[in-house]
Amino acid sequence: MRETLVLNASFEPLSTVSLRRAVVLVMQEKAVVEQAHPGLRIRAAAVEVPVPLVIRLRRYVRVPFRQRASWSRRGVLVRDRHRCAYCGRRASTVDHIVPRSRGGGDTWLNTVAACAEDNGRKADRTPEQAGMRLLAQPFEPTPADTLLLALGIRDNDALPGWLALPA
C-alpha cells in the first residue's frame, strides 16, 4: 500500500498514513493535497481526487516534542536500506555489534542490518573478535529522517522545493 506523508498546517512533517486514510482526510476536508502522483486519480460516482503523495492538515495539530526516533528492527533495516553492514548484500536480520549476552542493547548505535549468513558467522562475538569489519558506522536518525526513510526518499533532490531540507 502506498504511504502518504502528512504535514502539519505549518508544513512540519508529522507522520505517514496509508493511501486510504489520506483520501479520507482530503474528502472530509481536514487536509489538502500538496503533492500528487502525476497522472493518477481516484474516481468514484460523484468525485475525482488526485492520488496524494503529500497532504497538509488544514488546522494546526499540537505535537509533543520528539527529540529521538524510537528504535525498531524495521527502522534499522530501513535506515541501512536493507543492505548488510558486513558484505553489502540484501539484509533480512538485525545484528547487535556488542551482543545482548555481553550487555549490548537494542539501540540505534549498537545495531546494524545484516544478511543471515554474516549474522550467523559473527554469532555471539563483536565484529573485531569475528574478524569482520563494518562497511558503514551505525547512526541515530532524527524523527524527520525516519519519516523520509519510511517514504523511500534518500536525498533532498527527491523532495519538492517547498519541502527541501536545509543543506
Image (tube, rainbow, N blue to C red):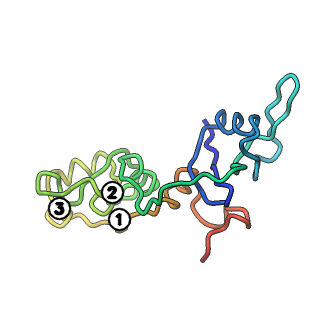
Between discs 1 and 2, the one toward the N terminus: 2
User: The residue tagged with tag 1: helix, strand or loop?
Assistant: loop
Q: Is residue 54 visible?
A: no
Q: CA distance from mark 3 to mark 1?
A: 14 Å
Which residue is at a point 33% across and 49% down the rendered structure image?
A: 115
Point out residue 78 in the picture as x, y percentages from the top left corner.
45, 52
Q: CA distance from mark 1 to mark 2?
A: 6 Å
**Residue 112: mark in rendering:** 2
Quadrant in the picture for residue 44: top right
Vertical placement of residue 1 versus 34, above or below: above
Q: Nearer the viewer, mark 3 or mark 1?
A: 1
- Density class for disc 2 (Cα within 10 Å; few <14, some 14-19, many ≥20) is many
**Residue type beneath disc 3:** Thr
Q: Which residue is mark 1?
A: 138
**Residue type beneath disc 1:** Pro
Q: Are marks 1 and 2 in contact (CB under 8 Å)?
A: yes
In the rendered image, the quadrant that contains the N terminus is top right
**Going by the image, does 55 lie left or right of 107?**
right
Between discs 2 and 3, the one toward the N terminus: 2
Of residues 154 and 72, the one drawn nearer to the viewer in this rendering: 72
**Going by the image, does 128 lie left or right of 134?**
left
